[in-house]
């Protein structure tokens, strides 16, 4: 899960299956990490893992507004698609993971130590997400 403003990956999970439990694990991490006020907007595609009754209930319980892409419109999730392209090209395709645990460890390292802290984003004035957020917090006072 990405913060759309700063591009920071705030919640993620890895599983052998794409299901509601996977998306809820990423959501739970994002909610714990960010502790957002009610009114946060959660935008996703219309996959069953996001549209399930369990996912919808968890989002509503957290005071989150639910937003989903229009059918067949990949442009509405461009930031997420860009993140996954970066993750694949700069980490996954360069590795030969031997175990699920190795993949999970390397992905966590990439997301937290590289993507969020070091990787520049042209849309953020060539700052990594963590530095962009720090600059915003400093400016905000």
Image: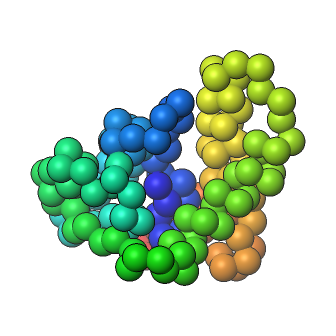
Left or right: residue 70 compared with residue 87 = left
Q: Residue at the spot x=40%, y=76% of the render?
A: 71
Count how many numbered circles sit on residues in the image.
Answer: 0
**Residue 62 in sight:** no
Name the image quarter holding residue 59.
bottom left
Q: Position of residue 114 (x, y in %)?
A: 72, 48
Q: Position of residue 56 (x, y in %)?
A: 20, 54
Using the image, determine if residue 22 lies above or below residue 117.
above
- Looking at the image, which is closer to me, 120 or 139? 120
Q: Quadrant of the C terminus?
A: bottom left
- Residue at image point 59% right, 58% down: 130
Relative depth, front residue between 90 and 21? 21
| Colour theme | rainbow
Q: In percent of the image, x 33 and y 42: which residue is there? A: 20
Q: Is residue 39 left or right of residue 83?
A: left
Could you tell whether 19 is left or right of 125 in the image?
A: left
- Residue 50 in the image: state x and y as whole percent: 33, 54
Residue 25 visible to an observer of this rendering? yes
Q: Is 83 on the left or on the right of 22, as rendered?
A: right
Q: Nearer the viewer, residue 32 or 16?
A: 16
Q: Tell me residue 39's x, y (percent).
A: 21, 69
Look at the picture and state if 53 lies above or below 77: above
**Measuring 74% from the left and 51% from the top, which residue is drawn there?**
88
């Amino acid at each position: 899960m990405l913060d759309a403003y700063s591009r920071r990956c705030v919640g993620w999970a890895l599983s052998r299956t794409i299901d509601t439990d996977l998306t809820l694990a990423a959501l739970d991490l994002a909610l714990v990490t960010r502790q957002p006020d009610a009114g946060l907007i959660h935008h996703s595609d219309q996959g069953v893992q996001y549209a399930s009754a369990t996912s919808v209930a968890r989002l509503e319980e957290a005071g989150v507004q639910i937003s989903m892409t229009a059918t067949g419109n990949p442009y509405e999730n461009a930031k997420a698609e860009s993140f996954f392209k970066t993750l694949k090209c700069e980490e996954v395709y360069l590795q030969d993971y031997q175990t699920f645990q190795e993949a999970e460890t390397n992905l966590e390292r990439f997301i937290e130590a590289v993507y969020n802290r070091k990787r520049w984003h042209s849309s953020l004035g060539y700052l990594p997400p963590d530095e962009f957020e720090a600059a915003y917090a400093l400016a905000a006072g």
